[in-house]
Image (cartoon, helix red, strand yellow):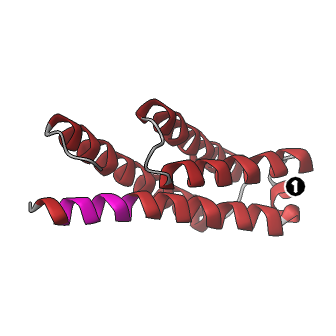
Amino acid sequence: MHMNRKKVLYRVAKIFISLFMFFSAYFSFSHPADLRALGFPDYFRIELVIAKCIGGILLLIPQTGRYLKEWVYAGFCICMVSAFIAHFCSHDPVSKLIFVGVDFILILLSIWYVRKYEKNSHADGLNA
């Protein structure tokens, strides 16, 4: 694949992850009753919003180190798994479980592509 195309796909994947988390943070902030219905206290909702926003911003900053980005990715994955478990335990409709599951898979695919690109670009001496 041509290097410019790889770089574009890499940036799209990072932007997708960040935008998804910004949307998720907005939803969590603007729908407190939905998170209470899942059994989460209000202070945890605020923590989630702040953590998702900080993580989304860190992924968009090119100078963010690899290890910090890996922690952000890990946090996002834990967040998605926790959301799936919360919806499952709250007996939410299957549609919500599918939505969270698909989102999780899309995030994993984006993370996989970003890590693959970063590994190849650092091995080739290219800047991401």
- In this view, 69 is above or below 105: above
Tell me where residue 51 appears, x and y as whole percent.
70, 46
Q: Is residue 8 magenta?
A: yes
Q: In the visual, does 86 lie left or right of 45? A: left
Closest to the observer, 105 or 111: 111
Q: Label 1: few (<14), some or many (≥20) within 10 Å?
A: few
What predominant SS class does the magenta segment belong to? helix
Q: Residue at x 44, y 54 (%)?
A: 107
* Residue 37, image quadrant: bottom right
Residue 22 location (% of width, % of height)? 63, 63
**Residue 80 seen anywhere in this rendered image of the structure:** yes
Instruction: Say which amino acid is labelled 1.
Output: Arg
Q: Residue furthest left?
A: 1
Of 122 and 76, nearer the camera is 122
Residue 34 screen position, x and y as percent = 81, 63
Can you tell which quarter of the image residue 123 is in? top left
Q: Is residue 90 visible?
A: no
Q: Is residue 105 left or right of residue 49?
A: left
Which residue does the image show at 17% across and 39% down from the upper left? 125
Q: Considering only vertical position in the picture, is 13 above or below 88?
A: below
Compared with 62, 29 (above or below) is below
Please give the residue where the numbered disc 1 appears in the rendered image: 36
54 left or right, relative to 10: right
Q: Residue at x 75, y 50 (%)?
A: 50
Q: Quadrant of residue 14?
A: bottom left
Question: Closest to the observer: 77 or 39?
Answer: 77
Q: Residue at x 57, y 54 (%)?
A: 56
Which percent across, then down, holds residue 33? 88, 64
Q: What are the residue bounds of the magenta stretch?
A: 5-13
Residue 111 is a magenta residue: no
Q: Specify whether 77 is left or right of 124.
A: right
